[in-house]
Image (cartoon, grey):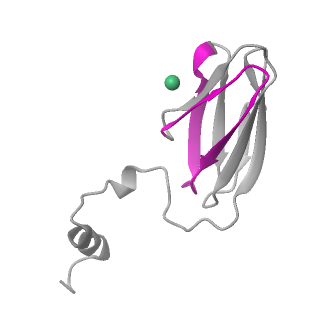
Amino acid sequence: MSRLPRLVRLVLATGACVPIAASPYVSAQAADAVEIAVSIKDHKFEPAQIKVAAGKAIKLTVNNLDATPEEFESKALSIEKVVAGKGLAVVRIRPLAKGTYNFVGEYHEDTAKGTLDAE
Ligand SMILES: [Cu+2]
């Protein structure tokens, strides 16, 4: 076993074949989450481009200023969270690998789109 690469040994030890390289998440342990807020107004995100530090947990507060509900959705991050009209929702995001992750407001995908840029 000692001659096997570490990753292979990890897979053997856990008995699971986890597609580590394909996951947007990094394994670094979350210290305190970085708090970020985004608003939805007129079915658009403000800001639409959110810069975050890679490798840090994120607490994203979504503030829906519209009267109608919206769903914060990111397929890249496997997140779906409904935000009531004039409501708030908190989305917790694990530490991210560097990259750009798209998100949308699923109920108004034509206008409600943005990116989380982890750098
Ligand atoms: Cu959805």
Q: Please tell me which residue lies in front, 36 or 6.
A: 36
* Region in magenta: 78-107
Left or right of 110 in this view: 10: left
Q: Residue at x 65, y 41 (%)?
A: 116
Q: Which residue is drawn at 58% across and 33% down?
A: 102
User: Any magenta on residue 72?
Assistant: no
Residue 93 at least partly seen: yes
- Residue 11, percent from left and from top: 25, 67
The residue positioned farthest toward the left in the image shown: 1
Q: Residue at x 30, y 56 (%)?
A: 18
User: Any magenta on residue 100?
Assistant: yes
- Residue 43, percent from left and from top: 73, 16
Relative height, residue 92 to residue 27 (above, below): above
Relative height, residue 62 to residue 23 (above, below): above
The residue positioned farthest toward the bottom in the image shown: 2
- Residue 65, percent from left and from top: 82, 22
Relative height, residue 80 to residue 30 (above, below): above
Q: Which residue is drawn at 56% across and 54% down?
A: 94
Q: Main secondary structure of the magenta part?
A: strand
- Residue 93, percent from left and from top: 59, 49
